[in-house]
Image (cartoon, rainbow, N blue to C red):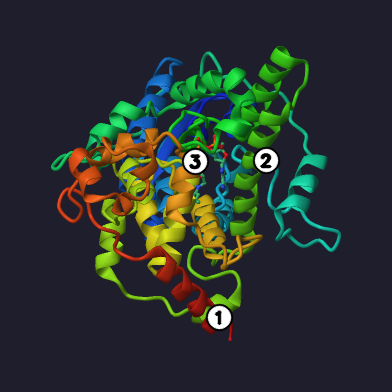
Amino acid sequence: MTTLLWFRSDLRLSDNPALAAALAHGGPIVPLFILDDEDAGRWRAGGASRWWLHHSLRTLAADLAKRGSHLILRRGPAERELDRVAGEVGARKVVWNRRYEPWAVSRDEGLKAALKGRGITARSFNAGLLREPWEVVNGKGEPYRVFTPFWRALRAGLDLPAPSEAPRHIPAPQVWPAGEALGDWGLTPSRPDWAGGLRETWTPGESGGQERLDAFAGRASLAYGEARNLPGREGTSRLSPHLHFGEIGPRQVWRALTAAAFAETGDLTPSGVEVFLSEIAWREFSHHLLFHAPALPEQPLRPEFAAFPWIQDSKGLEAWRRGLTGYPIVDAGMRQLWATGWMHNRVRMIVASFLIKDLLIDWREGQDWFWDTLVDADLANNSASWQWVAGSGADAAPYFRVFNPVTQGQKFDPDGAYVRRWVPELAALPDKLLHAPWTARPLELADAGVRLGVTYPAPIVDHAIARERALAAYALARA
Ligand code: FAD
């Protein structure tokens, strides 16, 4: 009997419980991907994510073809398309791995009931998280709102069976249903083609993710504790888009890192790996948070922020988006994002703080820009992180902690490697002036070929004044 295997954000063949269940069931398997923009509504994938999705699907289709199978592509509301394909191939069973976005959770609930009503069994599995949101709760049965006890509880009940290997062969039906051509979906840009930097930086797909993991496990992960805060170095894993699209799963990451660390040091979780695993746990925390607080992308978690006096500042917002604020570390981050679809975590915090606190622009504007431009744009991680910086989220940075973009730059990019890479017009400035070019004397600027306001902007706000303004706004909101 034919089984429909519905791929969603689990674009891999190894450690894929839905695929394993379909294989165990026996009989032909029809792999299906549905571009469900209508179901996702406002949270349909943004531009950079669509580029990634295109390449990831192409790779998945090739990986399936090597196993005698074939990826069917459809577009439209999932319920309609599942129903159609199930009818066309006579499937009595549909399997998938769960998603945690509120629109997907409620859609899937309805879908399961509808399929059951038509005599089709639907079963779902966990491929994307270490543990399910309903499994990690406190003594009162409530979800955690503070990270440290969450992490302790997550870990205490962790059971990581060995991930399944990709199968060598996937049984095919006698006749394949019709599918659409990936190229017809227009997921990649044509004119203008802004994806050149993405192509140079990334290899979407399961094997690309596996290669990144292999490169990071071992030495690099041991050094993560110190290296992760330095944007000028390759100190982090860059696994985020692979994790978001499910080309690799957190259980695989956990096992690979601990095994490699054990081989190098005899310890499963030496300090660098321990810090890294806690970041994987932040991912988990964000997903659980979104599951339990589905308004997270739209509304501040802490109600006092609902009345925050945000400013409408389209010029400031545009300068921020384009990396033209006059603060080198902020501009470097925004340009790295635009060019590569990714930004270092330390710099994400700096640019987010700058938008929210120096410019007093609503965090949702920043969230939207990231949604469109990040290859790892993830509803849970993005909304939880923006609210964390804004101070309105769970276990968030207090609002009065305002990042100083100059001292942050000096501390975390001390030799200026990051700023010089992304803001080349400042490259000839000496290190001590690089993060605050407006403090240079005219001769020093001239020597470096910098003309403030001409070759590089003067700061669009004075940080000291902006900080006071932010604190006053915060006091007003709390009052
Ligand atoms: P590593 O440092 O190697 O970490 C390994 C993995 O842990 C990451 O791939 C990611 O899955 C997870 N992780 C790390 N830090 C965090 C964190 N703070 N919160 C949740 N998960 C984390 N991450 C996204 O995946 N998608 C987003 O849309 C996103 N938006 C963000 C917005 C803001 C304002 C901020 C401050 C952070 C955001 N992050 C987001 C979290 C973090 O910046 C990225 O996960 C990280 O930079 C990805 O690079 P990496 O894979 O090299 O991370």
Q: Quadrant of residue 305?
A: bottom right
Q: Which mark is on residue 408?
A: none
Compared across the picture, whether 182 is left or right of 159 comes to left
Pair 1/2: label in front: 1
Q: Which mark is on residue 278?
A: 2
Residue 320 percent coordinates (x, y): 31, 57
Q: Amino acid at mark 1?
A: Ala
**What is the crowding at mark 3: few (fewer than 14 residues within 10 Å), some, or many (at least 20)?**
some
Q: Quadrant of the C terminus?
A: bottom right
Say if residue 165 shows up in the picture. Answer: yes
Pair 1/3: label in front: 3
Residue 12 percent coordinates (x, y): 50, 28
Q: Secondary structure at mark 3?
A: helix
Compared across the picture, whether 108 is left or right of 326 comes to right
89 or 279, which is in the foreground? 279
Q: Which residue is mark 3?
A: 412
Q: Which residue appears at 44% of the width and 23% of the height?
A: 208
Q: Which residue appears at 20% of the width and 39% of the height?
A: 447
User: What is the spatial separation of the Cα atoms under label 1 and label 3, in whole angstroms?
Assistant: 30 Å
**What is the crowding at mark 2: few (fewer than 14 residues within 10 Å), some, or many (at least 20)?**
some
Using the image, determine if residue 55 lies above or below residue 165: below
Q: Amino acid at mark 2?
A: Ser
Using the image, determine if residue 362 lies above or below residue 224: below
**What is the crowding at mark 1: few (fewer than 14 residues within 10 Å), some, or many (at least 20)?**
few
